[in-house]
Image (cartoon, rainbow, N blue to C red):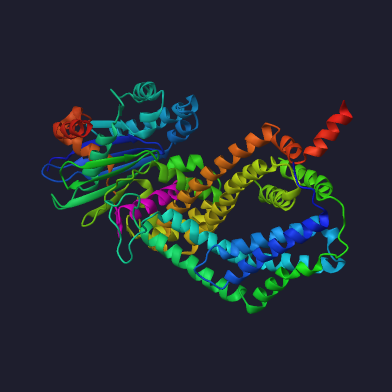
Amino acid sequence: MPERVSAGELARLTLADRSDQLRWAAARLPLAADLEAVPDCRMASRRLRELWMALADQLEPHSRGPRRRLRQLSAELRPLERAGARIRLLMELLGPVGPPGGTLQGPSTPGWRGREPEALRSLLESARLEEATLREQILSRRLISELEAAANFGAVVRRDGSATEAVQLARVRLPVLFEAASRTGRPLEPSRRRRVQRLLHGLELFSPALAREHQVVIAELTSVLGLLGPLREWRELVEWVDRAAKQGPADLRPALRRIVVRAELETEAAQESAEIELARLDQGGWWRTAAQACLPERRRSSRAGGS
Amino acid sequence: MARADRLAAIDVGSNTVHLLVAAAPEGAHPRPLFRRRAFVQLGLDVAASGRVGPERLELAGRVLAAQVQEARRHGARLIAVGATQALRSASNGEEVAAQLAQRAGVDRLHILPPELEAQLAFDGATLGVTPRAECMVLDIGGASTQVASGPAGGICRDRSIKVGSGTLLAAVGGDPPTSAEWRSMERLVASRVHRDLEPATGHLVLGTGGTITNLPRLLGKAKGSSLRPREVELLLELFRVGPATDLARRSGVDLERVRLCRGGAVILAQLMDLLQLRSVRASERGLRDGMILALLRRGEGWWRAEERLVEVAVGAGA
């Protein structure tokens, strides 16, 4: 059985935790070698914002301003996150052993043909340069200190926090999120990923008040997001390399175009995996069942009402 | 002085039906006397439906009959008629070949196996090159591309790639193509080009076929000039920024040929990178010249693969 947690308690419990996560992620931002710092920071920011939204009644009224500001700060980090993802995917394309510097490889080296090694090296250098430039432009002292300030926002939980049970709030909030995440109009649009992500953050937030089964739901959503995230990144990489293939050095363009083809194939593989996984959930009525499993009391009462 | 023997070769390709009448003086290389070309584009039908349709067959029949008559008018003693990838891959290829031969009044239209096509194009393109000099011949046809290498005048090693300028034109009709269409062309080429093409360092590289020989003209160079990778990229940029009609108007090249050149440039750019070529010298000679040589050597049996060639093919198959 889930714990009986009041909304006020839940706000206090989770706010400290999520604020800490954002604080630590923000502290890692200046570390250039830490490619996960920016995505972690944006993730922590989203989780904190979800908390502020879902538990708005438990927070002091002036919390709205910081929420908007945190959203803006997180958006400022987005180009840097994209640049980091590009480097990661290019490294993935390069495989465990990248092409050596300086010389062209002959056909005896499996996997690399023509000037592909040079072209990949040139792409990787461009991606790193772009990331470094963005890092310098975006990661100002101001941005980091503002993120830290947002993370220290824990003091705004109302002292007279509501005694309403957290599960009551979850009953209002989660069905909306489940409904949004299950909408299939254009399944692989970025909005679907964001909707599934918001549902995940909502479930994590109300976790102490939910039935144990919600952990299974969280695991499923994490798995789906693990497929939708790379899909978006591969799509962006294809466009980026395609631009390079049009504007890069003429001698490298044929090889760059082959790399675009290779990245497109990776995108298709990612898309296929994501589509299969989402179709499994969409066609099997999973979203509805999952929503019921996470909110057991509601399920019991509705059964009672129906009989 | 006795008049030199006259021979003719007609190549029924995926894009064109092309006649060459040549004089064959004793002890000298055959000399081209007359050429005639018509765009029939059998390859478009084959790409769309896997077979040659009745309208295209009718057109090809008329063109071929006219060219045979023209060859005879020019005094050709023997006429070699051969077809390449379009009829090789058409489900009704044999039937079409028989009907065309009957319509044109020739004994037979031979559908050339890819290795024979490559050897003939190699022989034709390297005619006049110092014997035994290592050569590579790129022949970008309408539905296939041959990459042949070996000593001039000798047997070549051939890789036949099942993509040509017409294949790409059939796949992408946009003019200029959208970004996605360009990518689909690149993808088609990447999927068909063999992964194990060996770099052709130290070879004299010759390009043959209507596409390669006309590409330099689109850059304002003389027909048959050399092309470097940067120039091929420049051509691709020209195709990307404007319609083929603009290029045709500026260069004076037939619009149909310009449209075919777009796909040819995509293929050539990839081959030059994969084979690590610094330049390709476009050669006016090619398959038809090779057919004339074969007529000279073997007469009516021109289309029979030389024994050496058969051995090579059997060895490769084993």
**Residue A38 location (% of width, % of height):** 59, 65
Vertical side of B114 occupied by A25: above or below: below
Q: Is residue B9 magenta?
A: no
Residue at 47%, 35% (x, y): give it. B44
Q: Position of residue A91 (x, y in %)?
A: 44, 58
Question: Vertically, is A128 above or below B194?
Answer: below
Query: With A93 as the anchor, is A197 left or right in this view?
Result: right
Q: Is residue B270 magenta?
A: yes
Q: Is residue A116 left or right of residue B4?
A: right
What is the total number of numbered labels drawn onto the structure image? 0
Query: Dividing the image into 4 quarters, which one contains the C terminus of chain B?
Result: top left
Q: Main secondary structure of the magenta part?
A: helix
- Is residue B151 at least partly visible in the picture? yes
Q: Residue furthest bottom?
A: A141
The relative height of residue B89 versus residue A242 in the rendered view (above or below) is: above
Is residue B75 something that shows in the picture? no
Q: Residue at x 79, y 51 (%)?
A: A5
From the viewer's side, name the closer residue of A236 and A177: A177
**Residue A14, percent from left and from top:** 73, 59
Residue A152 lies left or right of residue B106; in this view the side is: right
The quarter of the rendered structure image containing the N terminus of chain B is top left
To which quarter of the image does residue A301 belong?
A: top right
Depth check, front residue: B29 or A191: A191
Q: Quadrant of residue A49?
A: bottom right
- Of residues A191 and B16, which is closer to you in this image? A191
* Percent x, y of residue B292: 22, 38
Q: Is residue A4 left or right of residue A213?
A: right
Magenta extent: B260-282
- Residue at point 70%, 68% (across, down): A151
